[in-house]
Amino acid sequence: MTEIRRPAVLIGVGALLVVLTNAVVFVLPPLLPVIQARYGLATVAETTWIYSALTLGGGAGFILLPRVADVYGDRNATVTASALLTVGALVPAVGDSYPTLLVGCALMGFGGAAQLLPLGFLRRGLGESGIAVGVAVLVIATGVGIVVGVVGGGLVVQDLSLRSFFIVLTAACAVTTVVCHATIPRVPPAESTRRIGVLGSIWMIAWVAALLLTLTQGLVWGRAAVIPLVAGVIGGIAWVRVERRSSSAVFDVALMKAPLVTASCVCIALIAAMNSAFMLLLSTYA
């Protein structure tokens, strides 16, 4: 608390993070038809893998970044996430190809999970009012970020090339990284003994990606699509068995079994699937 001179600055940084990370997610759907034409992608499935890479990277980030904040501190976690956003935008700006775009989207997806971090550093930095302020910032800034992303995507389609867009995004993320390092205080970590389940998280992303690969490429590959399907199913079953005995499990099994938590997770998954399908289909139609 001694390092916080102006709480408004910390709130502003939290809002900036949430707006930027949501804008990155929602700016891509309007660009998908442009990306398909720019890189000569033959199928819609190839195009939507850009969004899948963003989602898979985000899944890993949502799991790992809050734990990084607990173990290594809010500033380190936030600066790391912002730096990954910067690198993720820089890779397609420099490479200007479909493979580099996939890599960049995966990195930006991971860094985009920084939208959760203001809940932690505002709670720790502002004391009793931090939780209420953090939730308010998250809700309001998420709405602003969605609008900025969708409108920004339309403007990019009209006025900028893809490479120019990623250069501008790189600059914005780099500035955010510097601001986070300069303003977020060094609060001692909440816990330092528990390990971070990095291996379990990577394993989970791998078998989920194999199943997604089957769904998106099944009609194109034919019988060959059975290979990633089998790998995904076996990998998922083995992952569940190992996680039950792990001392650094990705998810707290006892918490996940709670009725309200399970129902909430199912509802969030269904809402996320609906939103993603709507954005992808609407962009393709338009």
Image (cartoon, helix red, strand yellow):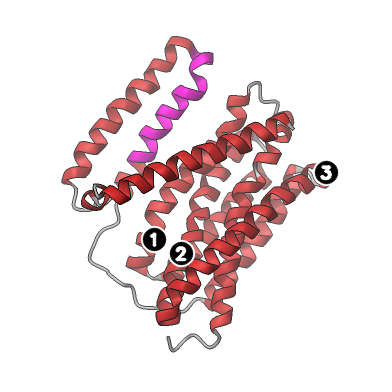
Residue at the spot of label 2: 117
What label sits on residue 196 in the rendered view?
A: none
The image quadrant that residue 203 belongs to is top left
Residue at the spot of label 3: 158
Pick whichever of labels 2 and 3 is earlier in the sequence.
2
Residue at the spot of label 1: 66
Name the residue located 45 percent from the left edge and 39 percent from the top edge.
270
Q: Classify mark 3: helix, strand or loop.
A: helix
Q: Is residue 189 magenta?
A: no
Whether pointer 2 and pointer 3 mark residues with C-beta atoms closer than 8 Å, the reply is: no
Q: Amino acid at mark 2?
A: Leu
Whether pointer 1 and pointer 2 mark residues with C-beta atoms closer than 8 Å, the reply is: yes
Q: Residue 215: x and y, percent?
A: 47, 23
**Residue 77 visible in the snapshot:** yes
Q: Which residues are magenta?
A: 203-221
Name the residue located 57 percent from the left edge and 34 percent from the top edge.
277
**Residue 250 visible in the snapshot:** no
Cα gap from disc 1 to disc 2, whole angstroms: 7 Å
Q: Is residue 82 left or right of residue 63?
A: right
